[in-house]
Amino acid sequence: MKTPLVEFRSVCKTYYMGEDIVRAADNISFSIYENEFVAIVGKSGSGKSTCMNIIGCLDVPTSGTYLLDGRDVGQMDKNELAEIRNEKLGFIFQQYNLLPKMNLLENVEVPLMYAGRPKGERRRIAKEMLEKVGLGDKIRHKPNQLSGGQQQRVSIARALSNSPSVILADEPTGALDSRTSREVLGMLQDLHQQGNTVVLITHDNSIAATAERIIRLADGKVIYDGPTEGAFSDEHMGGTGA
Amino acid sequence: MKITESFSLAISNIFSSKMRSFLTMLGIIIGIAAVMVIVGLGNGMEGYITDSFASVGTNVMTVSITGSGSSGTVKEEEMFAIVEENPACFEYISPMVSMRSSVKIGSDTLSYTTATGVGEQYFDIYGYTVAEGRGFRYMDMEKRTRACIVGCYVDQVLFDGQSLGETLRIGGEVFTIVGVLEQIDDEIDEGGSDDAVYIPYSTAARLSYSGTVSSYIVTAVSDDLVDAGQEIIEDALYAILRSSNAYSVTTMAAMLEMMTEMIDLVVLILTVIAGISLVVGGIGIMNIMLVSVSERTREIGIRKALGAKERFILTQFVIEAAVTSAIGGIIGIICGYGLSSVASNVISNMMGETLTVAPSVVSIAVAFGASALIGIVFGFLPARKAARLNPIDALRHD
């Protein structure tokens, strides 16, 4: 079997909240392979944000090993983390997180700029990506001139610009109405169809159902890891009947 | 990411909030403009003084005999002898006796006109030429004649250009005007160089209380011989008076140097004071940059998530501070230039003299460099704060 793209080996993450130790991730292990579409589901406090931060190389595990594309992220310094985020990951955030003072083209160019690509190439790729998400006619607009769904499409274009190994979508529909949510989820499915690896982080089961595989977290532990079809039976819902 | 991109980012950020950027720059603008005007004024003053000394001649020495600490006196003949014995070194000599008594024409007292007792070579020393009538002769000195030579203000304004042969009174004595000088200043004015009356020194000495001549003007053949000449005169005077306190020989070069040093010192002190406002301006920049960093925490988080290294964030903020400060510096230089030319005009009008307040190219370069440096120094702390933000916290920040 080929090497996983994302591999968690007994990953733990503990925080100190005053005197108490909080185990946000408690011995989590899973592997995500190329061209998978995985949803990491859990209620707030389940540890999914911690997982998302670790997968996104924004944070490192307290113990255990996280391998991204075979490289041990836990051993990296801040600069290497910044580099690997730039190269391997495409972020899609709940709040879109576009830079308000820049136009769409410039926003999509940001990851390419930090990758040190020349200006002409950046322009070309950014334009191509914006066309791909259907905003080719608005490249000079500022983010606040767009609707929420359109802004999320810009952030998808930005996530794709660096041809990342993993597309990491953190509650991508959290701020959208149901119609635009479907549109954005459809887009993620298309990306998956085109051969991208997509990791979707959400608290919403119906949204998680878009994925092909579900990893369900509760209290920092994995309670289900398998195909979407079996994920919503009672025994796999953490017994809370959510 | 290239440095030029950091610059264009910084410039677009600065221009996206113009009012705030302008207010941030204000301290630097005022500081730089103040330094420019002060340095410009200093240069102008120095230039003015150098010019006026140059018109007198830097080969001129002033000998002043005070007699303090000595029982001896120096006769005019002895001074003349010193100069005559060294023709290779000295060119001209003229005794100089300033008259305290005022000049009167008829019953009118002239409050600004000065009367000075001089030797026959005096006009040669200053390059004055006699336009009408005659200059002084040896006989005037020898016979203590009541002859006088007037400047062209006296001739043209007070005598309607018909002064030759007329009389005026100095200290109660009647003098006949025997010569009129060529115009000296660009404009003839009351109290200027053209508003003067010259009489033979010997006559002046007799009219004055002491009855002796205590100052002389001596010129060296060339500027190089000024120091040697000074030494010859000092040695000769010491031989006569036996006390080094009893006389002093001042060269124009030394006086010029002394005055230039004084102006430099004043300019330096004022520049330091103005420089303090630059530091205050720098603190203003630091303050606004700190505010800007906390306002843009989310932006920093996004940039970091997208792969910006700490170095990039640091550079971006430092450059933004430096560019803000440098733009302030440029505006300050322009304001300083404008104020300098206004100051030039005002001073020229007030003094009736041309004083060019010109900031030097060096001071412009230094001002610009200083403003950029202030931005870098005071921008560093906020920039480091930005660079060190934790991306997770920064992304969560509202």
Image: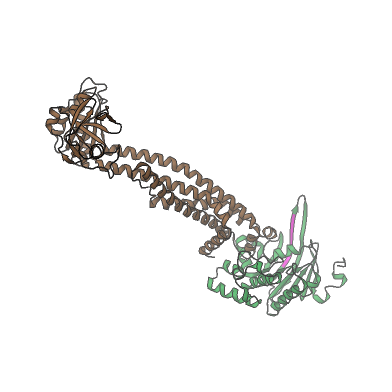
Which residues lie in the magenta part?
A: A8-15
- Location of residue A122 by image quarter: bottom right
* Chain A display color: green
Q: Left or right? Give the position of B111 relative to A93.
A: left
- Which residue sits at x=74%, y=57%? A14
* Chain B display color: brown
State the predominant SS element of the stretch in magenta. Answer: strand
Q: Position of residue A203 (x, y in %)?
A: 79, 67
Above or below, B273 relative to B99: below
Q: Is residue A39 visible?
A: yes
State the residue in front, B139 or B168. Answer: B168
Q: Position of residue B20 (x, y in %)?
A: 58, 54
Q: Left or right? Give the position of B31 relative to B172.
A: right
- Location of residue B50 by image quarter: top left
Above or below, B223 relative to A182: above
- Does B152 appear in magenta? no
Q: Is residue A69 visible?
A: no
Q: In the current view of this chain or complex, which residue is farthest to the left?
A: B139
Q: Position of residue A157 (x, y in %)?
A: 65, 73
Circle count: 0
